[in-house]
Every structure is written in structure tokens, then in C-alpha cells.
Image (cartoon, helix red, strand yellow):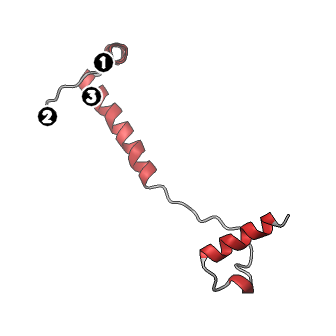
Amino acid sequence: MKTTFDIADNILSKARQLSRKESIPLKLLVEEGLETVLKRYAEQTQAKVSPVTCGGNGLSKDFESASWSEIRNAAYESQDSQ
């Protein structure tokens, strides 16, 4: 497919130099560069996140059925009393 886009002069100049030096058509050099970037982005979106735990025993009995709001308020109350 043919397409037209602007490339910064310094980047195009370096690409042309590499193309001549390595005897690689500029088209293939650009395609390889785009493929590399696309692959990198695809790998970033597939990264899995491992849960972070602190190795505790969960909530204390006082907070087992508490809402997040109640837990947060209790945490801040203990800071206010210091």
C-alpha cells in the first residue's frame, strides 16, 4: 500500500545512510522499524500484574464486615489521636 507522511529531515537522512550502508531498501528499513515499535507496544499491553500482598492474616475481626469507608475512617481516626 502506498502512503505519504512527513519524517524529520535528520531521521530520514540517517535512515537513508543506513539503507545505503547495509544495502537495504529504505522501504524495508521503515517497515522493520514500524514492526519493532508495534511489537513493543503489543508486549506492553499484554503485561500481567502480580498482586501485591503484605503477608498478613487479612482484616481483624472488628473489620471483617466493614465497608471501605468505615475502614478508611478508622485508619484516619487513629492518626488524628496521635
The front one of 34 and 64 is 64
Q: Amino acid at mark 2?
A: Met
x, y percent for residue 31: 28, 32
| Residue at 61%, 74% in the rendered image | 68
Q: Amino acid at mark 1?
A: Ser
Q: Secondary structure at mark 1?
A: loop
Question: Badges 3 and 2: C-beta atoms under 8 Å apart?
Answer: no
Q: Residues within 10 Å of mark 1 (few under 14, many from 20)?
A: few
Q: Which residue is mark 2?
A: 1
Question: Badges 1 and 3: C-beta atoms under 8 Å apart?
Answer: no
The front one of 82 and 14 is 82
| Residue at 38%, 49% in the rendered image | 42
In the rendered structure, the answer to whether residue 79 lies left or right of residue 46 reads right
In the rendered structure, the answer to whether residue 69 lies left or right of residue 8 reads right
In the rendered structure, the answer to whether residue 54 lies left or right of residue 22 reads right
- The image quadrant that residue 81 belongs to is bottom right
| Residue 1 drawn above or below residue 26 | below
Q: Which residue is mark 1?
A: 23
Count every numbered label the image shows and give the total: 3
x, y percent for residue 80: 79, 64
Q: Residues within 10 Å of mark 3 (few under 14, many from 20)?
A: few
Q: Which residue is mark 3?
A: 28
